Amino acid sequence: MISIKGLKKRFDDLEVLKGMDVKVKKGEVIVLIGPSGSGKTTFLRCLNALETPNEGSVSIGDMTVDFSEKVSTAELLKFRRRTGMVFQTYNLFPHMTALENVMEGPVVVQGKKKADVRANAIRLLEKVGLGDKIDYYPFQLSGGQQQRVGIARALAIEPQVMLFDEPTSALDPELVGEVLRVMKDLAEEGMTMVVVTHEMRFAKEAADKVIFMDGGYILEEGTPQEVFENPKHDRTRQFLNLIR
Ligand code: ADP
């Protein structure tokens, strides 16, 4: 489903991604871990074309973009629609209800008619357990509920891959579980997912593969058991000791 080759990203002189190679099969859940500043968010943002990589190629489904060449805006937008992104800080539109937030992508980005996307948006809000809150504004919802709207909104464009950037780290501890539950349900339904998170329990229970990033490289990857129980590198061990 995803094939990433030699992905590099610089911000001016700072090389943040130094050549990443990743393959993800359809239906796999990848959890990305690593110290702050190691490039996890930048990696996700490159997959969602919120950042344009400097080098390397990314294939998602049957579309390949080679970033060593000039990529047109139209192509980037088409590429972006292949992934749905869930952000740490929800990023909902404050002046729109939950339902309007979920309908926004299909209507504005995909140019669909409101009447045609409404039923699907309601179905998605029901799926994340918010069928009774569709007309609520973000300020009327808890952080966990807002994040579940964020997940429904990302799903609304029918992405082939879902990307999650620390989706629970801004939440009060008692609200983390409801968001992880929705993510686990999605994983069990066969959604292909790349998740940046410090929730090791989620990683153990839901990930097919854990990738440990450090300084813009993949230092280590394997099943959750391999990486958590038997890390090969001292850096991985040190990191795990700090967060456990
Ligand atoms: P992580 O998600 O692992 O904490 P990030 O991808 O957020 O790491 O950041 C990696 C590095 O890239 C950091 O040094 C950060 O300061 C830098 N960085 C991220 N985004 C930008 C940007 N838009 N401009 C300049 N530097 C950036």
Image (cartoon, rainbow, N blue to C red):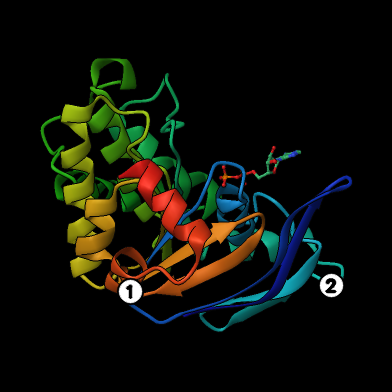
The residue mark sitting in front, 2 or 1, is 1
Point out residue 12 in the picture as x, y percentages from the top left corner: 88, 45
For label 1, count other residues whose C-alpha is less than 10 Å away and answer few (under 14), some (14-19) or many (20+). some
Q: Is residue 26 above or below residue 17?
A: below
Q: Is residue 178 above or below residue 203?
A: above
Mark 1 — residue? 226
Q: Nearer the viewer, residue 100 or 89?
A: 89
Point out residue 228 in the picture as x, y percentages from the top left corner: 32, 63
Point out residue 176 in the picture as x, y percentages from the top left corner: 22, 36
Q: Is mark 2 within 8 Å of ligand 1?
A: no
Kind of residue sitting beneath label 2: Ser
Looking at marks 2 and 1 on the same chain, the residue that comes earlier in the sequence is marked by 2
Mark 2 — residue? 68
Q: Secondary structure at mark 2?
A: loop
Q: What number of labels is visible?
A: 2
Residue projecting furthest to the top? 139
Q: Secondary structure at mark 1?
A: helix
Q: Nearer the viewer, residue 42 or 154?
A: 42
